[in-house]
Image: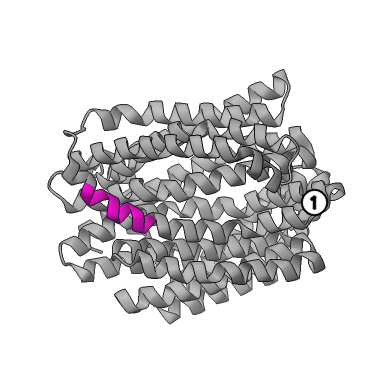
């Protein structure tokens, strides 16, 4: 590996580890909420939050990633940062007003008790979140990845502290949504000083350069987030009032399934500015190396996580949430497979965004939306939550294939067939060994450690893991001393 590639890989490792800590703290808060609220109220919380997340994530992937993409490409990066922060505040404030107005209609559509009030309460997060993600995008463009990682850990620690305080004072859905707002305030407070110290003058030229990129990225994310949310919205709409606990259990299992993939999405966030910088310099060979390394990392890391979720679904849901959620373990493996495919899809999207091909990616995903809706309309009435999970997995698979083909056209082959074969062999050996055991409770942790150790050993024995990975680990350890990202 070259020094640049090692620094990218080591920096990516740092961000992934920090993101893992972020989700570990956040997940403790999620478990506390699920246990404290119970399946019915937790389902209401999850559905309301899914609407907020849809609005936030579609809007988040406009100005923030546009800043991350443009800052390494231009000479006036500080002016781009100022334009991104100001425009993001304006956009998210406007979204607050819009969601406040449509809350009565949207609240009825989500089929949740007190839906309009809860949606308006959730919407208060929008302006704070908008400033926070703009600061994240600016830091990513400047490759100040540790700054964003620290802010995320502050965010998740604040959310956990707020949930624990609510448990003592009396936990409600409304209180949980207020804690979500306060966590964004804490994250912004941790990151804003880093950004505000290096803002340039306001420039209409910088804003004009930013907006077209933001519009293309936002169109892509609108398509992605819509396709990703159809399973939960369909299950909620097609479930009767007496079966609300089913939705709550599905939300809980969905969260478990998403966590590993969301942690590894940090690699896509590192890849976007890195690919953009390499392509701006005309170094397509370096861009392809970055893509190959990141795609290989996902292909190696995701299969054992999906496998373990499938093998221990009911035991894991009982251990994390309580026996009331155990039934969702039956489809946890399917949801984990869907989440892994969406992580790979998101990586392909980051590569296409860096290459300026956001619109074809968005059109491909929008074409999947009616397919996803049709699958849910057929499978949810027949199979309930398992049908929603299966529809999500099939949709994610189709999306990964479509975007993967677009990436191959832009960058050439990016995955070695030998890697796929070795990963498949390691997963098969791990599955055969793990199927003989039925762990429960804290014994799950030993089971997971042993299964992952076996998986790594098989990959090492086949030559898939070796000196390159040791070099990346060393680079990740040494980076704080080198301070190459700051």
The main secondary structure of the magenta stretch is helix
Camera-side residue: 150 or 456?
Answer: 150
- Say which residue appears at 25% left-offset and 39% top-offset: 83
| Relative horizontal placement of residue 12, taking residue 122 as reference (left or right) | left
Q: Is residue 195 magenta?
A: no
Residue 52 appears at what percent x and percent y?
A: 56, 42
Report the magenta residues as a range.
208-217
- Which residue is identified by label 1? 246
User: How packed is label 1: few (under 14 Cα within 10 Å), some, or many (20 or more)?
Assistant: many
Camera-side residue: 430 or 320?
Answer: 320
Q: Quadrant of residue 288?
A: bottom left
Residue 281 appears at what percent x and percent y?
A: 15, 62
Q: As displayed, is residue 264 above or below residue 163?
A: below
Q: As displayed, is residue 100 above or below residue 261?
A: above
Tell me the quadrant of the picture where the N terminus can be found. Answer: bottom left
Farthest-out residue, left:
75
């Amino acid at each position: 590996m070259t020094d640049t590639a090692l620094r990218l890989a080591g920096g990516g490792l740092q961000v992934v580890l920090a993101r893992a800590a972020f989700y570990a703290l956040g997940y403790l808060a999620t478990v506390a909420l699920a246990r404290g609220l119970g399946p019915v109220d937790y389902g209401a919380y999850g559905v309301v939050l899914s609407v907020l997340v849809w609005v936030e994530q579609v809007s988040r992937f406009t100005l923030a990633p546009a800043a991350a993409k443009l800052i390494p490409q231009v000479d006036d990066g500080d002016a781009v940062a100022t334009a991104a922060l100001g425009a993001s505040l304006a956009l998210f404030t406007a979204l607050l007003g819009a969601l406040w107005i449509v809350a009565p209609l949207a609240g009825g559509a989500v089929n949740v008790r007190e839906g309009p009030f809860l949606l308006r309460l959730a919407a208060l997060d929008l302006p704070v979140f908008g400033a926070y993600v703009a600061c994240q995008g600016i830091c990513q463009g400047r490759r100040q990845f540790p700054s964003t990682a620290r802010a995320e850990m502050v965010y998740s620690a604040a959310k956990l502290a707020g949930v624990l305080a609510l448990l003592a004072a009396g936990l409600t859905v409304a209180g949980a949504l207020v804690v979500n707002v306060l966590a964004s305030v804490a994250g912004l407070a941790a990151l804003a000083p880093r950004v505000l110290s290096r803002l340039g003058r306001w420039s209409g030229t910088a804003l004009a350069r930013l907006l077209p990129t933001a519009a293309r990225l936002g169109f892509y994310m609108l398509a992605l987030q819509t396709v990703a949310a159809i399973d939960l919205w369909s299950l909620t709409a097609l479930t009767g009032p007496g079966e609300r606990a089913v939705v709550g259990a599905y939300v809980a299992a969905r969260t478990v399934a998403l966590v590993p993939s969301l942690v590894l999405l940090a690699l896509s966030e590192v890849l976007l500015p890195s690919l953009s910088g390499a392509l701006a310099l005309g170094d397509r060979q370096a861009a392809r190396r970055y893509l190959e390394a990141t795609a290989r990392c996902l292909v190696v890391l995701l299969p054992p996580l999906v496998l373990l979720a499938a093998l221990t679904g009911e035991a894991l849901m009982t251990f994390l949430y309580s026996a009331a959620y155990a039934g969702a373990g039956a489809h946890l493996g399917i949801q984990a497979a869907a989440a892994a495919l969406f992580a790979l899809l998101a990586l392909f999207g980051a590569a296409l965004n860096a290459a300026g091909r956001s619109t074809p990616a968005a059109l491909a995903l929008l074409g999947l939306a009616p397919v996803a809706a049709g699958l849910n309309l057929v499978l949810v009435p027949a199979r309930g939550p398992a049908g929603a999970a299966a529809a999500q997995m099939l949709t994610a698979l189709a999306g990964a294939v479509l975007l993967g083909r677009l990436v191959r056209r832009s960058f050439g082959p990016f995955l070695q067939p030998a890697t796929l074969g070795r990963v498949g062999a390691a997963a098969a050996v791990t599955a055969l060994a793990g199927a003989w055991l039925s762990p429960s409770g804290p014994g799950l942790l030993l089971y997971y450690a042993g299964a992952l150790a076996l998986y790594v050993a098989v990959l090492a024995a086949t030559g898939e893991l070796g000196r390159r990975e040791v070099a990346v680990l060393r680079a990740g350890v040494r980076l704080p001393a080198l301070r190459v990202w700051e």
